[in-house]
Image (cartoon, rainbow, N blue to C red):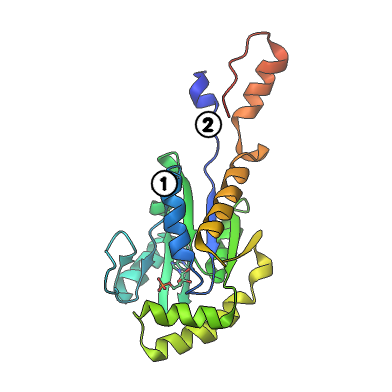
Amino acid sequence: MEIKSAFKRRGLLYVLSSPSGAGKSTIARMLMASDDGVAMSVSATTRPIRPGEVEGRDYHFVSDERFDAMVAEGAFLEWAHVFGHRYGTLKSEVIKVIEGGRDVLLDIDWQGTQQLKQVDPDIVRVFILPPSMEELERRLRKRGTDSEEVVRRRMDRAEAEISHWAEYDYVLINNDAEKCRELVHNILKAERLKANRRVFLHDFVRQLIGQGLVSAPDH
Ligand code: 5GP
């Protein structure tokens, strides 16, 4: 067996959830800039594209009919209704990232996280809380991309989203984006070292105790 492939580990599904406005997208972007071993799964959505968003980078923007067809084709690992639109994680996106040898970062809500946990119990779930509801509202307004009615609906929904915090493996409070990015990164780094994901360890330890000559990996 080639030693390099023997040291591969299983890619992980790393879920970030938070009420919208808690800084999750910023943290996701910062994480990817500081770690090239993780890439985002681009979801499909029926919601309209916002100014500044790019098709295929932020989302795959699809019609209701197309979304229906994708559901029928079994294209989704999970999907849910959020703010009157549908959002879903595409199997093809997750496979593309995993086959590229990277971990998958998923920005999905609590409903999607619950479904994904059923599909793959090994997922890592992180919930990001805002420091206060006032701060959350301030951040939503600062963004300025949504109408007043949408901001109100998002504030109403934030409370419902937050009520699911205890279903997550890690819960962080985003007082400071860089500090929060560092914690999200630390969690990822530690999770990568978990024994059950480092499938190469079986062969490595067999070699270690069975033979004198062992090429040790550097991580
Ligand atoms: P936004 O419209 O602000 O981009 O996203 C709204 C919410 O939809 C966010 O809380 C985000 O986490 C969630 N979301 C985005 N993509 C998916 C997805 O593929 N599945 C699920 N379940 N939620 C998603």
Residue tagged 1: 97
Q: Looking at the picture, which amino acid does disc 1 mark?
A: Val
In which quadrant of the rendered view does residue 145 lie? bottom left
Q: Nearer the viewer, residue 137 or 166?
A: 137
Tag 1 or tag 2, which sits nearer the N-term? 2
Visible residue check, residue 173: yes
13 to 165, vertically: above or below: above
Residue at horizontal 29%, vertical 59%?
56
Assess disc 1: are there few (<14), some (14-19) or many (≥20) residues with their C-alpha within 10 Å of its C-alpha: some
Horizontally, residue 156 falls left or right of residue 66, namely: right
Q: Inspect the image, locate mark 2, and give the three-letter code of the amino acid beneath it.
A: Lys
Seen from the viewer's position, the closer of residues 25 and 122 is: 25
Estimate the x, y position of residue 11 in percent, counting from the top left. 52, 43
The structure residue drawn at horizontal position 36% and vertical position 87%, both measured from the top left corner, is 147
Most extreme residue toward the bottom, as rendered? 149
Q: Which residue is mark 2?
A: 8
Toward which corner of the image does residue 210 lie, by quadrant?
top right
